[in-house]
Image (cartoon, grey):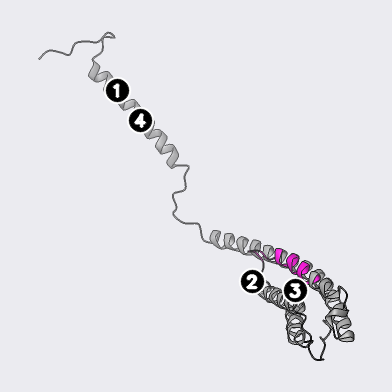
Amino acid sequence: MRDAKPNSTGSRPGRAWFIAALGAVCVVGVGLTGCATTVDGRGSAAPGEVAAYQADLSASRAAELASDGAALCRVAMSSMVVMVRGYNEFVRKLNEVQSYDKLGELDDKARASLIAGADLIRKEITSTTPPDLAEVTERFLDSTGRLGTAIARHQLVGLNPVSTQWTQDKQAVLDSCATYLPLPPTDGASAAPAPSGPAPP
């Protein structure tokens, strides 16, 4: 059998290719070995790492809820002061005159304060608001809407049950806010009773 014809460098092509390929394989193999020594092959975190991570998440979540709860309560409490003041001014005059026609613009001002306050409070309810606080606040906003509607319909006696529920829902928000903020004095923060006389024709 003839020997393979030498190439221009005088070596046999088959042997040269094999040596080069072997060298490449060795280089890749070293690279893989090097990588394998620097990567942790564990499929799960070490005991305690998960617990520490979950604790960090829980603490972060709790802090976020507390912050958002306090923010909502600050807006709600300041808005309630204006809302109650406007409503009480309106209803005291209504108790006196027993007629919406003699109120001037007090009914419109009362409704405006209710609407403006509700809008400000609603903007503070987010996905990170504490669920219990969000729930009672939503009920208060619903009551506020019903009270505004009753005023717009020029109700007299009909204001009583709506106003009573509104006051109760307001207090529920304040009670919930005690968890997130110290409450200010509540003197004069209750709604005045609506007229007890007959409704106008």
Of label 3 and label 2, which has the lower sequence position? 2
Whether label 2 touches label 4, CB < 8 Å: no
**5 w.r.t. 14: above or below:** above
Identify the amino acid type marked 4.
Cys
Of label 2 and label 4, which has the lower sequence position? 4
Nearer-the-camera pick, 44 or 146: 146
Residue position marked by numbered label 2 in the rendering:
131
**3 w.r.t. 173: above or below:** above
Of label 3 and label 4, which has the lower sequence position? 4
Find residue 55 and report its horizontal and vertical position in percent. Answer: 61, 63
Quadrant of the rendered image containing residue 94: bottom right
Which label sits on residue 177?
3
Nearer-the-camera pick, 181 or 199: 199
Disc 3 from disc 4: Cα separation: 69 Å
Identify the amino acid type marked 2.
Pro
Of label 2 and label 1, which has the lower sequence position? 1
Disc 3 from disc 2: Cα separation: 12 Å
Of label 3 and label 1, which has the lower sequence position? 1
**50 w.r.t. 39: above or below:** below
Can see residue 186?
no
Whether label 3 touches label 1, CB < 8 Å: no
Quadrant of the rendered image containing residue 5: top left
Residue position marked by numbered label 4 in the rendering:
26
Residue position marked by numbered label 1 in the rendering:
19
Q: Is residue 153 left or right of residue 35?
A: right
Mark 2 vs mark 1: give the one in front: 2
The magenta stretch is 113-130
Characterize the local packing of mark 4: few (<14), some (14-19) or many (20 or more) Cα atoms within 10 angstroms. few
